[in-house]
Image: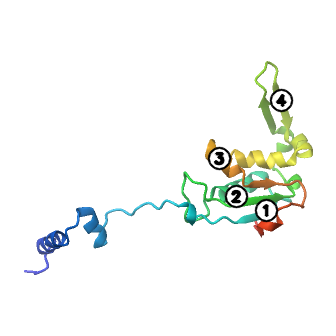
Amino acid sequence: MNPFDGSTVLTFLYHLKIALKLSRSDFLDRIGHRGMNKTYVAKKEDIKRHWYLVDAQDKILGRLAAKIAVILRGKHKAIFTPHLDTGDGVIVINASKIKVTGRKLKQKVYRRYSGYQGGLREVPLETMLKTKPTTVIRLAVRRMLPGGPLGRDILKKLKVYADDKHPHKSQNPVLLEV
């Protein structure tokens, strides 16, 4: 007969719990025998923000936007929490020099509606790149972020510029290869 069979160990643990005057959950925490791990939730003091610089020249629009959205959202960090803004800031330069695949330059259309009859405005991607290249990247990233207040706050950390000049030298952005 084994002196350390299951019933003897359980009896010992039961008496130890009573001697320490702990609740069942505190006792299990103390001996390190929890069934499930606790979910980590980031706190404001845990969130460290960095700034990244992305050169969009000759990059494909959708792939670039997907990687930027991940960084803005904070999914690249171990402390990611879905309901908090744990992401970093992104500065995009050379937005006017992005590439798209296939026939999207002619076929992709940006639509907006004023709410009035006949108020539908359609602008092809080719025209949009000539007139407002920053809006193309901003819309692509925005549509990959959650809607609502969290998504709007996350989008404020995205800065897009058509050429290679930006006024964010003081943030010390790290060049990010995408």
First along the sequence among labels 3 and 4: 4
Q: Give residue 22's quadrant in the image.
A: bottom left
Q: Which residue matches tag 3?
A: 151
Hey, what amino acid is under mark 3? Gly
Q: Which residue matches tag 4?
A: 121
Q: Mark 3 near mark 4, Cβ–Cβ under 8 Å?
A: no
Q: Which residue matches tag 1?
A: 54
Hey, what amino acid is under mark 4? Arg
Local packing at callout 3 (Cα closer than 10 Å; few below 14, some 14-19, many 20+) is some
| Left or right of 149, for residue 34 | left
Q: Nearer the viewer, residue 41 or 138?
A: 41
Q: Regarding mark 4 in the picture, which secondary structure is present there?
A: strand
Q: Nearer the viewer, mark 3 or mark 4?
A: 3
Q: Which residue matches tag 2?
A: 67
Q: Mark 1 near mark 4, Cβ–Cβ under 8 Å?
A: no
Hey, what amino acid is under mark 2? Lys
Q: Mark 1 near mark 2, Cβ–Cβ under 8 Å?
A: yes
**Residue 16, percent from left and from top:** 17, 73
- Residue closest to the far left: 1
Q: Nearer the viewer, residue 99 or 102?
A: 99
Local packing at callout 4 (Cα closer than 10 Å; few below 14, some 14-19, many 20+) is few
